[in-house]
Amino acid sequence: MSSTESRLDYLDATRAFALLLGVVFHAGLSFLPIFIGWAVQDISTSLWIAVFGTISHSFRMELFYLLAGFFSRMTLGRRGLAEFMGSRALRIVIPFIVGWFILRPLIVSGWIMGGASMRGDYEIWPSIMGGITELRQMTEGPLVGTHLWFLYYLVLITACVLTGRFLVRLLTGNSAKLPVQVDRVVTWLGSSRWTLLLVATPIAITLGYMNNWGMDTPDKSLIPHVPVLLIYGGFFTLGWVLHRQPETLVTFSRITAGRIAALVLSIVCVVMLMKIQGDPGHPNFQVARNIYHVGYAVMMWTLVWLTIGLFRHVFTRPSATVRYIADSSYWMYLIHLPVVVWLQVAVAEWEINWSLKLPFISLATIAIALLTYDLFVRSTWLGQLLNGRRRDRVIFATR
């Protein structure tokens, strides 16, 4: 096994972790102590869920987009521009559009059931019909209001990067000077003592233009949310550039005492200031928001790099199990939200602590997604669409 193949094994595992963390993140939203407009609020809540949600939301999608940029450039180099664009259309655009029409009514039905359950009762079939009715009316507009926004932004960012790549080549006459200079800057940045300051500062400034504290979720409109687009696009572009020199990724993701200390301090800062977020009348509200964004930016970067570094150290050898989970993670994330919401509604009134309900919802969702992946996706045309090729079933393998 070559070093390149081993490297892709751990990066595939890291990308799968980012997506599966999203499943747990969404599974925890019903246990927040403050109602945020989610489908349902469980009778058992905890401040720890708010802390977990804030920390996980600060880096999971940034990690995903960085690795998406890395793998996108790898695919472009292997297949060429025409085939690359075709694969993006098949693996991203089609799942985004088709998935919206299938998943949107199921998600809405979960919201209908959740509202009814908080009033004392709910019915499954009328809720499903309500979701279908909402789809016909499109009260929020087409292709919005689901977790599939990440695919829409992936398309936008990829288009921006390809356009920038074309313009650079057009203006420089296909000269290699600019890419070499960019590589030198990135190499220096990866080993500089000023790295964290230089990368966290623009993130903290951009966070100041969000509607909320921390990262916004741009799921309400097809009009690009510029601050979100800039941050996710920046991570994607960095991943794209890092593919030119993968050894620099190792430098960026090294695990050091200084980075661990910075992570701990940034988490403490963010958690201490969280309570002010809901109090706009606080005399130091804006100052606290600015400090929060600095801590959030540091937390974001250190978690991204330390997560990659941790997976690089742990997944040193190819694993069939890890490979299988990595292959299935895209499907799992695509379909997870309606399953999560329905399970949240089902257990909301159970007299059981959240610490038992959250693992149950998360593991049950992952189990359902894995079973459906193996049975209906992996060896079928869906597997070829989502993963590039068909693979033999594992759970339901025929002997």
Image: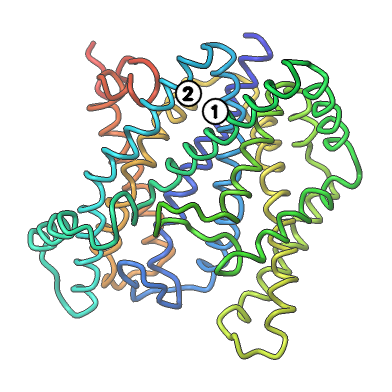
User: What amino acid is labelled 1 in the image?
Assistant: Asp
Label 2 crowd (10 A; few <14 / some 14-19 / many >=20): some
Residue 117, image x, y percentages: 20, 73
Label 2 vs label 1, nearer the camera: 1
Instruction: Kindly identify the residue that appears in the image at 79 percent across and 36 percent down.
Output: 254
Instruction: Kindly identify the residue that appears in the image at 70 percent across and 65 percent down.
Output: 293
Q: Earlier in the sequence, mark 2 or mark 1?
A: 1
Quadrant assignment, res 182? top right
**Residue 219 vs residue 380, the one in the foreground:** 219
**Can you identify the residue that label 2 sits on?**
323
Residue 370, image x, y percentages: 32, 34
Where 131 sits versus 82, above or below? below
**Residue 248 vs residue 155, the one in the foreground:** 155
Contact flag, marks 2 and 1 (Cβ < 8 Å): yes
Where 41 sits versus 307, above or below? below
Task: Please state, as top left, top right, bottom left or bottom right, where the C terminus lies in the image.
Answer: top left
Instruction: Kindly identify the residue that appears in the image at 65 percent across and 89 percent down.
Output: 282
Residue 12: numbered disc: 1
Quadrant assignment, res 286? bottom right
Which colour assignment does the render follow?
rainbow
Where 391 sits versus 207, above or below? above
> For numbered disc 1, what is the local secondary structure?
helix
Q: Could you tell me how far apart the alpha carbons at marks 2 and 1 are, in whole angstroms? A: 8 Å
Label 1 crowd (10 A; few <14 / some 14-19 / many >=20): many
Where 264 sits versus 312, above or below? below
User: What amino acid is labelled 2 in the image?
Assistant: Arg
Residue 363, image x, y percentages: 37, 47
